[in-house]
Amino acid sequence: MAGEFDTHERHMWAGAADAYAGSFAALCAATAGALLDAAAVGAGTRVLDVGTGPGTVAAAALARGAEVVAVDAEPSMVALAAANAPGAEVRHAVLPRLPFADGSFDAVVANFVVNHVEDQQAALVELRRVVRPGGRLAVTIWHGTGNEAMSLFNLALDEAGVERPVYPAPVDFARTAEGLRGLLEQAGWAGVDSGEVAWTHREDPEVWWSGPAGGVAGIGLVVTGQTPEMFARVKSAYDRLAAERLAPDGLIALPAVALLASGQC
């Protein structure tokens, strides 16, 4: 049975594949190479990409010559990933239960996925189940601090006077390199390495706004849940704040910090 947080996640992402692909997906794609490196994915590796989204990591793994299976909990993401990663076997599946036999894969990767599961440890135990002895795991999540990518939206909501709803929360853990390392170790992964990946995402402000305006993620539920008048106030505040950060090339710079952890089965 899905818990309250997992049920909320299914509602939050329902039908959001195209809006996500056109907005936040480029930000999340920045870690794909490092993620695959950490999982030692190369030619001939049988890899499972969990929470594939629009298939970004799956496509990158195929480009390395890997044999790729990709799954996602959201049907619209499954359809988009199948189109974006031809050659991958793309299926619908929801953590913490996967439809694969024990030891089915050489490696498993999860790019910004573990934080979208109510019981992260149960999910990581399940990922270990489907990896062969000696196989590898690599996961990314957002760092608990230091990310400015979403702060622009929150500043606009504050300026417009929007009250935030209280959404269900997952089982919590420290969103630090040490916290993520501990989570993997508790799930039985060995030789865990964990660290930070930092970069600056540059984006057109209208493309960035299209994420919440399209209902993507929690911020999208807040923005699209407003009255037309309040929505317009939030957009006006966002436009002003984005204009203050605009570079000469017309893009805004969004500093991002992720956590990347890997381990061995």
Image (cartoon, grey):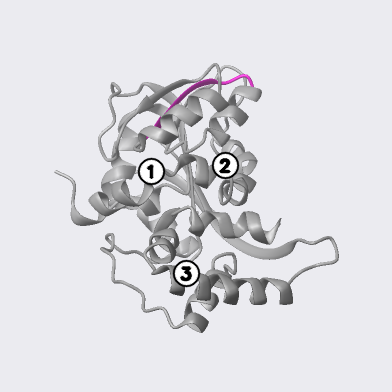
Q: Which residue has dot 3 on it? A: 231
Q: Nearer the viewer, mark 2 or mark 3?
A: 3
Residue in the image at 41% along x and 61% along y: 224
Observer-side mark, 1 or 2, equals: 2
Amino acid at pointer 1 = Trp
Q: Is residue 217 above or below residue 80?
A: below
| Residue 2, horizontal then vertical, whole percent | 18, 46
Element type at mark 3: helix
Report the front residue among 113 and 47.
113
Q: Nearer the viewer, residue 178 or 71?
A: 71
Q: Which residue is mark 1?
A: 189
Describe residue 198's horizontal placement relative to residue 81 as left or right.
right
The x and y percentages for residue 180 are 43, 57
Chain part drawn in magenta: 64-72
- 2 is within the stretch colored magenta: no
Q: Position of residue 190 (x, y in %)?
A: 41, 43
The residues bearing labels 1 and 2 have C-alpha atoms spaced at a distance of 16 Å
Does residue 144 lie above or below 19 as drawn? below
Res. 201 visible in picture: no
Seen at 42% across and 55% down, the residue is: 217
Q: Position of residue 193 (x, y in %)?
A: 51, 50
The quarter in which the C terminus is drawn is top left
The residue at the far left in this view is 1
| Residue 181, quarter of picture | bottom left
Secondary structure state at the residue bearing disc 2 = helix
Mark identifier at residue 35 = 2
Q: Judge whether 45 appears above or below 173 on screen.
A: above
Give the position of the N terminus as an image quadrant. top left
